[in-house]
């Protein structure tokens, strides 16, 4: 079943692990590596599998193929048609979900310990033996056409699509994850089978298990799900420098408010200065109620309900993005304020006091992300995917503590480029004209 | 791309997800000034969720002041006689904590998630703003602009939300649930600092509040801290029983059509007035919850099978019910047509499917699968201390007791096929309903 998801952008999720969370790296008898965190106090188990690739593996003329394929994984598998599969899931209260992003396809399963064998088998048949029955294809096609039509007037979807087209022309990132009504309309069973073969592969998977299982029990689960999957045969897309060069792009949509997505080039996750940039972003716009942008745009002037900035975790072209909505007649003022704050950070960096407050929050909030098994499972695959190492959990706060105002001044001067900051405005803004491209 | 902002707790489609666990070792206490205390221990990690819930929501607002409960919620972060202006969230953040708040029809809640050793700090801050809020001339104007922007983001930018407001207004002929939580724009734009202070003075007091602490704490620790910080606060004599205008017997089915040029996917949705959970008597609400699951809770539900799988004329169809409500709530069904199917056709098919259900009755295997999921959700619920705290908070501010919350899974488990058919026959009375259509239009006009 297709979820009505609006996940256009992968916001960077900060990775950290509570000192209390013990993580083991295990290689199964079948030779598959995964991370395990045992938590025996509740008889439940969460399993998270992330396959690199995701929607970036859509063929150029078939955007939405991976999303549609993922929507069909629980619509008939093995010897079960869609209803039989759904009944079997309900009988064991399985919670199995599939999600597609620009770079990943993720499988999330939560289950009671006592039925982990049954649920693991349901996950296995879904990812290894999806049937792609004709009636299920037509059902999911109808759903996805509905979603993609709705996306055409959804302010967040519209701004995301426009910005990614500007940033990555002709790259897979420029194409909508959900596809378009025409691309979904022509999708064939062969397209879906090809998307399945390209994305769900053994050598691009990151796996974690959290909950009430022993290492041996968890290894059995992993082998059961993963053994039999093929190796990858489709190359991942090339890296691409983004093409955002400044200016304001207006996309018309009736209504009283404009939705703005803005940004320019970001920073690679494996850049030595990534953590510095992360702390800088927290102070500028990542820190919710405490950020500079919230103070200037919301608290002092009441121009928005929310403004935030974030470093995206895109694998082939990192971006530094921000999002805000404001009434059509005040959005110009908001854009000016964002530009001014961008310039201020570039030229002056942050104060000792701001840095010390940011550190206290970022290190103190450290354990708060570990409050459910499934969130911990998410984090463990994220740490693996970013190749931060199993000891990242113990190093993370030290990395944050080591950041100095001089480090931030250096990264701010390098990263913050007010002249390249590109704004996509969806709405009917007053006083803005389209495509004011400073570079041209 | 989540907006980190004070949230209006709009009613969601929470069905089985609200189940709290009977396994959780919940403990309670009362202070002499009337403050109720609920502690939900969870020692897996050294963190706590500290919540203060007020038994006051948008349905308790004076006429003409819609949105004041939510506006006050925003202003509660501005500062007190001890906390400098604009520093509330800053102090929480500088201690490694996160804070937020939410407003609904029946409650207003504030919370912090923070390391367990910082509990004294945040409890002291909550106690401080319970009676010593300061709203200066400088802050109330911009904050009113913020809630107007919030309304634009949540409602005016979303045709489905616009229709939702109209549906509630039509369903409730007399009860304030017909007024949006966030307020009507024309009334919000004239709210003042004095309106907020009047509402605050009248309703914010220890005897109108519940302190809920979940996480790495014990009842003794919480009571000791609560005595110290909340204990000195005087109870208020302006807190009275919450008696709102009740619904008359409706005699006319209502129909609405909302057209908006932004709508790409039309749908039809119907709400019926429905019984809510009541203290010591939540059997009917339990049966309605199971009914909603049978009709529209998942892939094998009656409406999904009939309209989406078998006939293929809908892309989605389902049912919804949330029984946690102080006064009468609603039960609903909806269908989203596929291309080539009209709203009239999909509504007729939905009604035919409901009629068939009323004649053939409950599929016992389906009921058994739902019971399995209810039992499982009780165990899954223990994984989230914040979720458990919310289940208790919303119930206790909706006229229920801790015992009702703990009995809820058993009440759901005890629902029989006969119970389901009885409440189905009662609730699906068109005279007590609103059927609404969301449609696109070619005219390039939209409300501001």
Image (spheres, coloured by chain):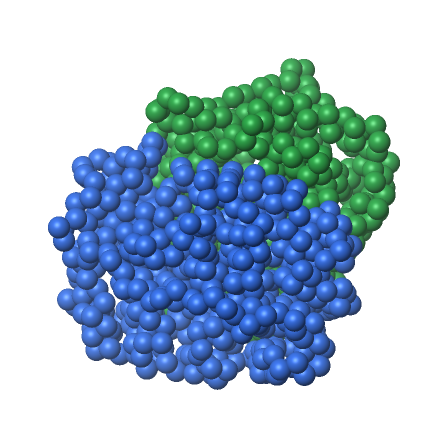
Chain colours: A blue, B green
Q: Is residue A360 left or right of residue A5?
A: left
Q: Which of the 4 image quarters holds residue B364?
A: top right
Q: Residue at x 52, y 70 (%)?
A: A232
Q: How many marks?
A: 0
Nearest the eye: B402 or A349:
A349
* On screen, residue A402 above or below A180: below
Q: Position of residue B303 (x, y in %)?
A: 70, 35
Residue B259 in percent (x, y) is at: 46, 24
Work out which quarter of the rendered image holds the N terminus of chain B and state it.
Answer: bottom left
Q: Can the viewer see residue A320? A: yes
Q: Position of residue B29 (x, y in %)?
A: 66, 59
- Please state, as top left, top right, bottom left or bottom right, where the C terminus of chain B lies in the image: top left
| A342 lies left or right of A427 | left
Extreme residue toward the top, this view: B252
Decide: is A217 above or below A2: below
Instruction: Note whether residue B194 is visible.
Output: no
Give percent across and percent down for residue A256: 33, 33
Name the residue located 62 percent from the left edge and 55 percent from the top edge.
Answer: A73
Left or right of A91? Residue B395 is: left
B232 or A43, nearer to the observer: A43
- Residue lying at 65% horizontally and 56% vertically, measured from the top left: A130
Depth order, front residue of B152/B298: B298
Residue for point 44% across, 62% down = A103
- Relative to A151, residue A84 above or below: below
Query: Residue placed farthest to the front in the image?
Result: A190
Q: Nearer the viewer, residue A174 or B360?
A: A174
């Amino acid at each position: 079943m297709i979820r009505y998801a609006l996940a256009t952008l992968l916001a960077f999720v900060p990775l950290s692990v509570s000192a209390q969370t013990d993580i083991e790296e295990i290689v199964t008898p079948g030779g598959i590596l995964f991370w395990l965190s045992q938590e025996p106090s509740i008889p439940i188990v969460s399993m998270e599998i992330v396959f690199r690739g995701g929607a970036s593996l859509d063929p150029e003329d078939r955007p939405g193929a991976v999303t549609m394929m993922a929507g069909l994984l629980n619509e008939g598998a093995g010897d079960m048609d869609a209803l039989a599969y759904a009944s079997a899931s309900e009988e064991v209260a399985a919670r199995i979900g599939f999600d597609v992003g620009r770079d990943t396809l993720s499988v999330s399963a939560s289950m009671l310990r006592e039925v982990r064998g049954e649920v693991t088998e349901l996950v296995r048949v879904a990812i290894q033996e999806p049937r792609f029955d004709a009636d299920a294809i037509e059902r999911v096609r109808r759903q996805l056409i509905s979603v993609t039509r709705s996306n055409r007037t959804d302010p967040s979807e519209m701004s995301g699509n426009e910005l990614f087209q500007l940033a990555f022309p002709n790259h897979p990132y420029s194409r909508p994850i959900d596809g378009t009504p025409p691309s979904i309309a022509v999708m064939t069973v062969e397209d879906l089978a090809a998307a399945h073969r390209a994305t769900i592969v053994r050598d691009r998977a990151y796996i974690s298990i959290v909950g009430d299982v022993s290492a041996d029990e968890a290894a059995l689960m992993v082998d059961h799900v993963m053994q039999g999957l093929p190796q990858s045969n489709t190359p991942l897309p090339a890296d691409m420098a983004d093409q955002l060069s400044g200016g304001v792009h207006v996309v018309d949509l009736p209504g009283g408010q404009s939705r703005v997505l803005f940004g320019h080039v970001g920073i690679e996750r494996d850049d030595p200065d990534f953590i510095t940039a992360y702390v800088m972003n927290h102070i500028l716009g990542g820190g919710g109620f405490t950020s500079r942008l919230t103070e200037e745009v919301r608290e002092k002037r009441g121009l928005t309900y929310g403004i935030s900035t974030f470093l995206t975790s895109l694998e082939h072209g990192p971006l530094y993005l921000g999002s805000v909505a404001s009434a059509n007649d005040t959005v110009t003022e908001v854009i000016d304020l964002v530009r001014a704050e961008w310039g201020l950070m570039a030229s002056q960096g942050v104060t000792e006091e701001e840095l010390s407050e940011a550190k206290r929050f970022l290190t103190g909030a450290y354990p708060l992300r570990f409050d459910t098994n499934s969130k911990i499972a998410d984090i463990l695959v994220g740490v693996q995917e970013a190749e931060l190492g199993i000891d990242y959990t113990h190093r993370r706060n030290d990395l944050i503590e080591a950041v100095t105002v001089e480090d931030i001044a250096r990264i701010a001067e390098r990263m913050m480029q007010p002249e390249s900051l590109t704004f996509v405005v969806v709405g009917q803004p007053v006083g803005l004209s389209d495509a004011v491209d400073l570079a041209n | 791309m989540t907006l980190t902002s004070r949230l209006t707790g709009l009613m969601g489609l929470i069905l089985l997800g609200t189940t709290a666990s009977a396994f959780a070792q919940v403990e309670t206490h009362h202070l002499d000034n009337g403050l109720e205390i609920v502690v939900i221990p969870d020692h897996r990690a050294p963190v706590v969720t500290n919540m203060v819930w007020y038994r006051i929501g948008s349905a308790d607002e004076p006429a003409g002041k819609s949105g004041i409960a939510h506006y006050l919620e925003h202003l509660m972060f501005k500062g007190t006689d001890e906390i400098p202006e604009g520093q509330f969230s800053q102090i929480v953040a500088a201690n490694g904590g996160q804070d937020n708040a939410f407003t609904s029809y029946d409650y207003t809640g504030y919370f912090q998630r923070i390391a367990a050793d910082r509990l004294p700090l945040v409890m002291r801050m909550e106690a401080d703003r319970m009676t010593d809020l300061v709203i200066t001339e400088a802050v109330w104007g911009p904050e009113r602009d913020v809630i107007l922007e919030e309304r634009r983001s949540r409602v005016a930018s979303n045709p489905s939300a616009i229709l939702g407001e109209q549906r509630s207004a039509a369903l409730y002929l007399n009860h304030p649930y017909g007024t949006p939580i966030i307020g009507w724009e024309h009334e919000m734009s004239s709210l003042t600092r004095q309106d907020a202070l009047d509402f605050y003075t009248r309703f914010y007091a220890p005897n109108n509040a519940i302190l809920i602490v979940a996480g790495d704490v014990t009842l003794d620790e919480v009571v000791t801290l609560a005595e110290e910080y909340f204990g000195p606060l005087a109870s208020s004599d302006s807190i009275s029983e919450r008696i709102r205008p009740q619904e008359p017997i409706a005699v006319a089915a209502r129909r609405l059509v909302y057209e908006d040029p932004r709508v790409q996917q039309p749908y039809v949705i119907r709400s019926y007035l429905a019984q809510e959970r009541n203290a010591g008597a939540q059997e009917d609400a339990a049966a309605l919850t199971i009914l909603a699951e049978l009709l529209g809770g998942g892939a094998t539900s009656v409406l999904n099978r009939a309209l989406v799988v078998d006939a293929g004329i809908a892309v989605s169809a389902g049912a919804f019910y949330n029984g946690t409500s102080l006064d009468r709530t609603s039960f609903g069904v909806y269908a989203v047509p596929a291309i080539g199917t009209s709203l009239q056709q999909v509504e007729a098919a939905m009604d035919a499917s409901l009629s068939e259900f009323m004649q053939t009755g409950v599929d016992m295997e389906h009921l058994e699968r739902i019971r399995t999921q209810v039992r499982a959700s009780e165990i899954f619920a223990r994984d989230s201390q914040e979720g458990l705290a919310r289940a208790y908070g919303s119930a206790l501010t909706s006229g229920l007791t801790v015992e009702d919350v703990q009995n809820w899974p058993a009440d759901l488990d005890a629902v029989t096929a006969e119970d389901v058919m009885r409440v189905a026959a009662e609730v699906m009375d068109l005279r007590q309903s609103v059927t609404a259509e969301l449609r696109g239009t070619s005219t390039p006009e939209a409300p501001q």
